[in-house]
Every structure is written in structure tokens, then in C-alpha cells.
Image (cartoon, rainbow, N blue to C red):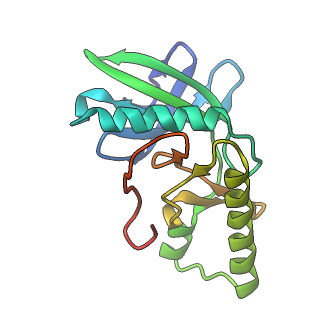
């Protein structure tokens, strides 16, 4: 996909902002209201097993049931065809900001007070995830999945490794060094 492409007659691609083994992530605009969104696109043809699709479905289902001000809102989910490939698309609220990883790579160093505030925000999100039923475990909290916006608000993103305790199986998912 490229900038300008429109999916589902509604979401106009602006730029690719990430890529993984089984899909890509794009910043887009909802042409019905010009609100920025994120499209997480799972390309079934790139998957080696059903596991990736199952994780995509679990992520979408969990996000549909989450309501927390520091987790981007679920917007939509749909299937699309592109060049004979089947794509599954998850749409979420776009959070303008920088990840901790991006901040560190530019040389930014936070004060002790700011680090404590970010940690407290993350603990608040984790407490919320543990309070809902079934309990949700993110499983990949790392500097690439924590965004800080211009007002200093901390957000937790990328629930691709999420597990709700209603699912079974001893799957290990996450970023080495952070799991």
C-alpha cells in the first residue's frame, strides 16, 4: 500500500509507520471526519501459520472491550483484498507523539521525576487491564510500545502480543529483555 490509497472507501493511507513479519502499520485519515487513525494490517499471505491470525483476532477482540484514556481507542476492523491477497485491518485512534525508544535515540534524557511519572502511568494502565474481566496481559511493554504525546501523557500501544486469561496456552510473546 502507498500514500493516497483508500481502504473500505473510508481510510486514506498517509504513511507507513511500522512493519513486522506478518504485516504493516500505517497512519491514515478517516475521510468521513478527517480524524487520524492507525491501520494495523495483517497480511495472511505472509503468515506461516494460523497463530498470527489468531493473535490478530485476539488483539482486535480485546481492544474492542477496553476503555482507558491512555490506550488508543478501537475504531473498526475489516477484511480487504489487495492484488489477490487477503488483508485483515484493525483501526485504532492515532496518538501523535514519540515513543520512549525514539526519544532515547535522539539523545533525550528524562528527569527522575518524569521517569517516575511515566512508570506510574504505565502501572495505572496495567492495574486497569488486570481489573477487567477477563484479565488482560499486554506481554510486550517496551520502549517502542510506549508513546508520550506533546502534553506529556503516556500511552500504551501495540496489543499484538496481548493475552486475555480467557484464552489458553503457554505462549511466550514479547521483546527479549522486556518480557
Tell which residue pokes out farthest to the left in this image.
48
Drawn side of residue 116 relative to residue 134, left or right: right
Q: Residue 99 in the image: state x and y as whole percent.
A: 56, 62
Q: Which quarter of the picture shows residue 22?
A: top left
Could one spot residue 72 in this view of the protein?
A: yes
Q: Which quarter of the picture shows residue 42?
A: top left
What residue sits 69% from the left and 40% below the top? 66
Q: Residue 168 in the image: state x and y as whole percent.
A: 44, 42
Could one spot residue 39 in this view of the protein?
A: no
Q: Is residue 127 above or below residue 163?
A: below
What residue sits 66% from the left and 44% below the top? 72
Q: Which quadrant is home to the C terminus?
A: bottom left
Q: Residue 117 in the image: state x and y as whole percent.
A: 75, 74
Drawn side of residue 82 relative to residue 124, left or right: left
Q: Which quadrant is home to the N terminus?
A: top left
What residue sits 75% from the left and 60% below the top? 153
What residue sits 75% from the left and 64% below the top? 152
Drawn side of residue 114 relative to residue 177, left or right: right
Q: Is residue 18 above or below residue 22?
A: below
Q: Is residue 106 above or below residue 29?
A: below
Amino acid at each position: 500500500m502507498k500514500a493516497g490509497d483508500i481502504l473500505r472507501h473510508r481510510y486514506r493511507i498517509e504513511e507507513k509507520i511500522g512493519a513486522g513479519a506478518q504485516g504493516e502499520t500505517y497512519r491514515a485519515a478517516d475521510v468521513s471526519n478527517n480524524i487520524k487513525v492507525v491501520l494495523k494490517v495483517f497480511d495472511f499471505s505472509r503468515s506461516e501459520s494460523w497463530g498470527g491470525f489468531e493473535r490478530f483476532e485476539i488483539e482486535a477482540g480485546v481492544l474492542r472491550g477496553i476503555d482507558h484514556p491512555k490506550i488508543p481507542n478501537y475504531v473498526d476492523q475489516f477484511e480487504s483484498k489487495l492484488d489477490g491477497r487477503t488483508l485483515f485491518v484493525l483501526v485504532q485512534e492515532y496518538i501523535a507523539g514519540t515513543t520512549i525508544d525514539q526519544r532515547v535515540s535522539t539523545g533525550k534524557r528524562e528527569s527522575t521525576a518524569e521517569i517516575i511519572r511515566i512508570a506510574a502511568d504505565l502501572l495505572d494502565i496495567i492495574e486497569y487491564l488486570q481489573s477487567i474481566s477477563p484479565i488482560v496481559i499486554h506481554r510486550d511493554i517496551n520502549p517502542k510500545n510506549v508513546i508520550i504525546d506533546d502534553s506529556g501523557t503516556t500511552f500504551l500501544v501495540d496489543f499484538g502480543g496481548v493475552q486475555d486469561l480467557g484464552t489458553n496456552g503457554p505462549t511466550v510473546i514479547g521483546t527479549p529483555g522486556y518480557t
